[in-house]
Amino acid sequence: MLVKKIFKLKNLKYVLLVFLSACIEDAPLDSLSPEGPYARSIDELFWITFWIAVVIFVIVQGALLLSVFVYKEKPDSPEPKQIHGNTKLEILWTVIPVLILAAIAVPTVRTIFDLAREPENALKIEVIGHQWWFEYKYPDYGITTANVLVIPADRPVRLEMWSNDVLHNYWVPKLNGKRYLVPGQTTYLNLHADSPNEFWAQCGEYCGLSHSKMRGRVLSLSQSDFDAWVKNEQRDATAFSTDDLSLAAEGQQVYLNAGCTQCHVINGVWDVQGDRIAPNLTHFANRNVFAGAALKNNPENLTKWLANPAEIKPGTFMPNLELTESEINALIAYLETLK
Ligand code: HEC
Ligand SMILES: [Cu+2]
């Protein structure tokens, strides 16, 4: 029997492993440790519902165990009283669940409306889903960035979201629930972080080969740090002159000649502005992760990425450009200047 098999001693460790996963301390995608008012209101609703379910579970299972052990059939016991067709009982056990569900519906509906309401004084940010990374635009500031969503702490943020290709889903478990990103349709999600911190995001809808590597970070900053970040993001990158002999300047030449500009934008370096299909790299070096937050931003990972992007993210639209080792080194030196 399956149950017997599972509880065989040598299999027990796998069962225990499942329980152990609940003990993990550093769980950045844990939806049970809210760090902002939206996530907290969902958490409160969860616990109300959970405890109601616990009470029902105890009553139902208690009654079950009672009948199994205390009222079990004995050799000479008479046939028990039959209650099939008892209208009073049937009404009772229909009405009780209806009342319980109605009671749960009150805080649920209230929370749904609270979460959907556009907050006052919210900062508007556009979130655009791409296979397999998130793009962020700040219409009030003229900023375009990717992967790391920077927000002011203790101020509500209103995300206006859509997708560039297929269905995606934006989820920052510690700040709010999930919301779909739909091609050709705008959806909205509010975020609000209590204090300066870093949070993890994950695409919550299977969206193709590298869906599991479509992650993100949310960085909440104090108002003054946020203002400084905005100011810096609004700056163009400084272009190296062609007679500069540094490795970074050489990297800029590789960048301009190897076809990177077809897909990427670096403000101030390439004069054709506008949307591209790839992350804006103007301030790439200030982001601690890249490629949909699948990788930490360091020279080692960049080397791997530039050598063969699809090895890290299968299906990625960034091609293998057959770069030589020295071209890659120059490109990395250049990318590191993009602060
Ligand atoms: C055909 C389009 C295309 C070309 C050409 C291209 N890239 Fe990309 N690049 C992409 C796409 C798409 C991504 C995002 C991939 C992902 O995260 O899934 C990307 C991601 C990156 C990233 C990570 C950015 C981030 O913030 O996540 C870097 C760095 C990068 N490319 C550098 C380059 C360089 C340097 C070149 C030229 C040698 C280049 N790319 C050429 C499409 C392109
Ligand atoms: Cu996705």
Image (cartoon, grey):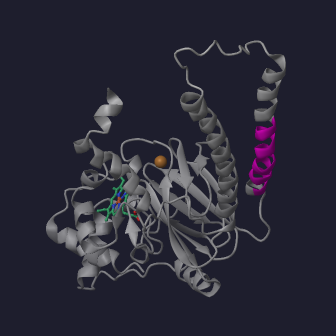
The quarter of the image holding the C terminus is bottom left
- Percent across and percent down for residue 179 are 61, 49
- Residue sitting nearer the eye, 179 or 233: 179
Regarding residue 223, the answer to whether it shows in the image is yes
- Residue sitting nearer the eye, 244 or 77: 77
Tally of numbered tags: 0
In the picture provided, is 153 more to the left or to the right than 273? right
Is residue 109 rendered magenta in the image?
Answer: yes
In the image, what residue occupies the spot 34% across and 69% down? 296
- Percent across and percent down for residue 322 are 19, 56
Spot the residue most to the left: 325
- Percent across and percent down for residue 108 are 75, 48
Spot the residue most to the front: 76
Regarding residue 186, the answer to whether it shows in the image is no
Q: Would you say the magenta stretch is mainly helix, strand or loop?
A: helix
In the picture provided, is 16 more to the left or to the right than 144? left
In the image, what residue occupies the spot 52% across and 46% down? 168
- Percent across and percent down for residue 248 are 28, 80
Q: Quadrant of residue 183?
A: top right
In the image, what residue occupies the spot 43% across and 77% down? 286
In the image, what residue occupies the spot 41% across and 72% down? 284
The quarter of the image holding the N terminus is top left
Q: Quadrant of residue 238?
A: bottom left
Is residue 329 rendered magenta in the image?
Answer: no
In the picture provided, is 93 more to the left or to the right than 47? right
Q: Quadrant of residue 333?
A: bottom left
Residues in magenta?
A: 99-114
On screen, residue 76 above or below 23: above
